[in-house]
Amino acid sequence: MTTATATKLSQETLEVLKNFASINSNILVEPGNVLKTISPVKNVLAEATVKETFDTQFGIWDLNKFLGVVSLFDKPEFVFDEKFVTISGSSGASVQYYYSEPSLLSVPTKSITMPAPVHSFTLTQKNFAEIQKASAVLQVSD
């Protein structure tokens, strides 16, 4: 048995996981610092490089529930064990969140290889918010 060390997940990594939960409710995290997900019908594939490096492969069946558990803690720390992750907060409370069997999860089998861009542009947060507002007012999703 290996000795696990406590780690914290950055807000950026938690945001990536929240975004990935909108693509697929489950995820398999492989050792390293790259997170990948694919939609159940395999028409959306996403990949993100995060600050943290994971030493253990683990699967989360319900990513929204996992993020909900994480939100219960102020400055949560994670200890990744062989069968579960222990999430603890500054108050001393903790939860053991058991991993899912990897064979039950929808996982990408390939990495994303993007061609060189034909055009590039900058989309500011303000412009994006305006587009989202217009989309809501016009009741269109695209």
Image (cartoon, rainbow, N blue to C red):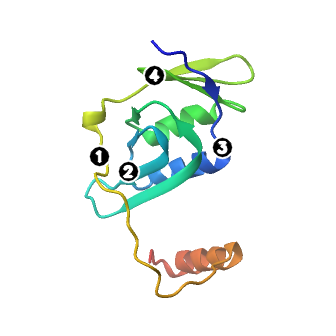
The amino acid type of the residue labelled 3 equals Ser
Q: Are marks 1 and 2 in contact (CB under 8 Å)?
A: yes
The amino acid type of the residue labelled 1 equals Ser
The amino acid type of the residue labelled 2 equals Asn
Q: Which residue is mark 4?
A: 84
Q: Which residue is mark 1?
A: 106
Residue pictured at 63% horizontal, 51% vertical: 12
| Relative height, residue 43 to residue 100 (above, below) | below
Q: Which residue is mark 3?
A: 10
Q: Position of residue 79 (x, y in %)?
A: 57, 23
Mark 4 or mark 3: name the one nearer the start of the chain: 3
Q: Are marks 2 and 3 in contact (CB under 8 Å)?
A: no
Few, some or many residues within 10 Å of mark 3 (<14, 14–19, 20+): few
The CA distance from mark 2 to mark 3 is 21 Å
Mark 4 or mark 1: name the one nearer the start of the chain: 4
Looking at the rendered structure, the secondary structure element under dot 3 is loop
The CA distance from mark 1 to mark 2 is 8 Å
| Relative height, residue 91 to residue 41 (above, below) | above
Identify the image quadrant of the C terminus: bottom left
Q: Which residue is mark 2?
A: 24
Q: Position of residue 105 (x, y in %)?
A: 30, 40
Q: Position of residue 127 (x, y in %)?
A: 66, 80
The amino acid type of the residue labelled 4 equals Phe
The CA distance from mark 4 to mark 2 is 21 Å
Residue pictured at 45% horizontal, 30% vertical: 56
Q: Nearer the viewer, mark 4 or mark 2?
A: 4
Mark 1 or mark 2: name the one nearer the start of the chain: 2
Mark 4 or mark 2: name the one nearer the start of the chain: 2
Q: Position of residue 140 (x, y in %)?
A: 45, 78
Between 135 and 110, the one nearer to me in the picture: 110
Question: Would you say residue 67 is visible in this rendering?
Answer: yes
Residue pictured at 41% horizontal, 39% vertical: 30
